[in-house]
């Protein structure tokens, strides 16, 4: 199976930094919004470096589980 091409790995308005990434430049993760075949993820400190590509369904489940984990108990 071939990986979908991501033609612009540089700064792009579609790349969005995680809200959990601090402004001090620590562990920074960015996702590419609006990609037609899933969710590309990269390290914002090396935008020209490799990306991971996740199918949209599993990515959504992953994010939901993180949000549920972080939700305060009643």
Image (cartoon, helix red, strand yellow):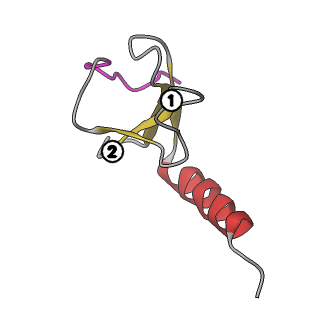
Camera-nearest residue between 58 and 63: 63
Q: Secondary structure at mark 1?
A: loop
Tell me: 31 left or right of 69. Answer: left
Q: Nearer the viewer, mark 1 or mark 2?
A: 1
Residue at the left extreme of this rendering? 13
Residue at image coords 32%, 18%: 9
Camera-nearest residue between 69 and 23: 23
Residue at image coords 29%, 17%: 10
The quadrant of the picture occupied by the C terminus is bottom right
Q: Position of residue 72 (x, y in %)?
A: 72, 76
Q: Position of residue 40 (x, y in %)?
A: 44, 34
Residue at image coords 26%, 23%: 11
Camera-nearest residue between 6 and 21: 21
The total of numbered circles placed on residues is: 2
Residue at the right extreme of this rendering? 73
**Dot 1 crowding, Cα within 10 Å, few <14, some 14–19, many 20+:** few
Q: Is residue 70 above or below residue 12?
A: below
Q: Position of residue 46 (x, y in %)?
A: 46, 14
Q: Quadrant of residue 63?
A: bottom right
Q: Which residues are magenta?
A: 1-9
Q: CA distance from mark 1 to mark 2?
A: 23 Å
Q: Secondary structure at mark 2?
A: loop
> Does label 1 or label 2 sit earlier along the sequence?
1
Tell me: 74 left or right of 1. Answer: right
Q: Is residue 41 above or below residue 1?
A: below
Q: Is residue 2 magenta?
A: yes
Which residue is identified by label 1? 24
Which residue is identified by label 2? 33
Camera-nearest residue between 27 and 31: 27
Residue at image coords 48%, 26%: 42
């Amino acid at each position: 199976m071939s990986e979908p091409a991501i033609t612009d790995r540089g700064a792009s308005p579609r790349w969005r930094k995680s809200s959990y990434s601090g402004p001090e430049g620590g562990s920074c993760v960015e996702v590419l919004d609006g990609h037609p075949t899933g969710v590309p993820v990269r390290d914002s400190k090396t935008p020209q470096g490799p990306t991971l590509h996740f199918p949209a369904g599993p990515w959504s489940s992953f994010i939901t589980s993180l949000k549920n984990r972080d939700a305060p108990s009643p």
